[in-house]
Every structure is written in structure tokens, then in C-alpha cells.
Amino acid sequence: MKKLLAEAFGTFCLVFAGTGAIIINDVSGGAVTHLGVALTFGLIVMAMIHTVGDVSGAHLNPAVTLGFWAARRFPAAEVLPYLASQVTGAVLASAVLRGLFPGHATLGATLPAGPVMQSFILEVILTGILMFVILSVTHGAKEKGLTAAAAIGGVVALEALFAGPVCGASMNPARSLAPALVSGHLEHLWIYLTATVLGALLAVPLCCGMREEGCCSRRTA
């Protein structure tokens, strides 16, 4: 239960701060700026890895949980409870933001700015890169709290910075699902539920092919 509470809390904070930055940027006439939104996502991920990483691993992302499971670093029995906790935390965050900003139309939902397939492919690649970094910095000598948090948060901020204006740079099904459900903007949700998971799963064989033997083959009990 401590792990599940940590995942729910961490994902709540991620969605509350990240999509909250988008909402406040909109209602304030751009005071936060796109750079500020990207940094907010990266910094909150970094903070949550430091805060709850020692409790639950700080996945904060269903795609990451599925990626760890595919890499044989996470037990199958814990996958669904982790996903439920992450989605619960994310939805609670969007519900709070709806109460604070009832006039905002999308609540920071991820929506494609161009062709659908453009955003789909971008999300696959973005999530694949993120998952590869996560797998790499949470194994062996680099499995250090500060190093992992900085690398993962940095990748989130970087990808949000350059790809956010086109596809939203979700990289996280829960981050996209929550504001879409609460705001009612479900029309493009399938992109962010499927592309992110696909990207995370594709990162696993890439990591296996590049890292030392046994990196992603020891099934956790």
C-alpha cells in the first residue's frame, strides 16, 4: 500500500504541477511561457523521483511501469495496481484543477497541433527515448538518486521543450488521460494511450541490444 500511495501521490503532483502550469500560462496571458511549462514538467519529475523513488521507484507513468515489466525488472502482479494508482492520482489532480479553474476548456490536455500521425510518431519516439534513458540510469553503477533524477527530469523537460508545441509531448498515458476525462476532450486520447506505451515497449529491445547481457532479462519475483 505504501508503494501504491507513493505512485498516486507522485503522479498527482506531476499532473497538478505540469498541467497546472499550462492552465496558468493560458489564463495569465503567457506569464509562465512554454519554456516555463517544459521546466515545470521536468522539475516535478525530478522532485518526485527524489521524494518517492525509494518507496515505489517513482514510475509516475503507466508506460514506464509497462516498460519495466517488459524489461523483466518489475513483477507482473504489481502492474495493474501501479497503473490504477497512477491513473487515480492523475484524475484527482485534474479534478482539483477543474475546481480551481472551472472556465478552462481543456485543463492542459494533450492535443495534436498538426496531422494525427505526426503526433503519434513523435510520441512513440519521445517515449522511447525517455524509457531508454530510464532503463539506462536505473541499472548498474549509474543507479544513483541524483544522477537518475537529473537525467530523467532533464529528458522530460527537453522533449517537452521542443516537441510540446506540436504533439503535447505527453510521454505518459495517465498525464493525458486525466485532463481528457475531466474536460471531456477525448477525441485524440487514443494517440497518447497507444503511442506512449508502444514507445516504452520498443525501448526495451533497444536497451537489451546496447547494454550488457542480463540487463533486462532477470524477472523480478
Image: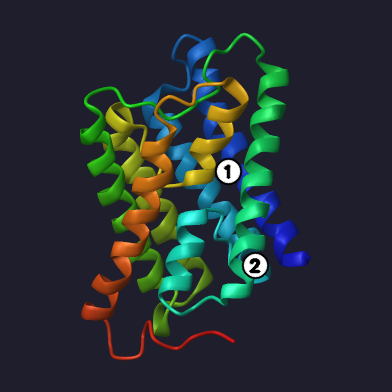
The one of 19 and 184 positioned closer to us in this rendering: 184
- Which disc is residue 56 wearing? 2
Q: Residue at x 32, y 45 (%)?
A: 158
Residue 99 picture quarter: top right
Residue found 32% across the figure and 55% down from its top = 199
Let me know if residue 130 appears in the view. Answer: no
- Residue 5 in the image, given as x and y percentages of width and height: 75, 57
Q: Residue at x 43, y 24 (%)?
A: 187
Q: Earlier in the sequence, mark 1 or mark 2?
A: 1
Residue 111 at x, y = what percent?
A: 38, 26
Residue 177 image label: none
In this image, 37 relative to 169: left or right? right
- The colour style of the image is rainbow
Relative to 81, does residue 196 appear above or below in the rendering?
Answer: above
- Tag 1–tag 2 contact (CB < 8 Å): no
Identify the residue under disc 1: 14
**Residue at (30%, 65%) from the top-left corner?**
203
Q: Amino acid at mark 2?
A: Ser
- Residue 54 in sight in this render: yes
**Most extreme residue toward the right, as rendered?**
1
Residue 1 vs residue 147, the one in the foreground: 1
Q: Amino acid at mark 1?
A: Leu
Residue 119: x and y in percent read 27, 35
Query: Is residue 111 placed above or below 104 in the rendered structure?
Result: below
Quick one: 57 or 150, which is closer to the camera?
A: 57
In the image, residue 105 sits, relative to residue 146, either above or below, namely: above
Helix, strand or loop at mark 1:
helix
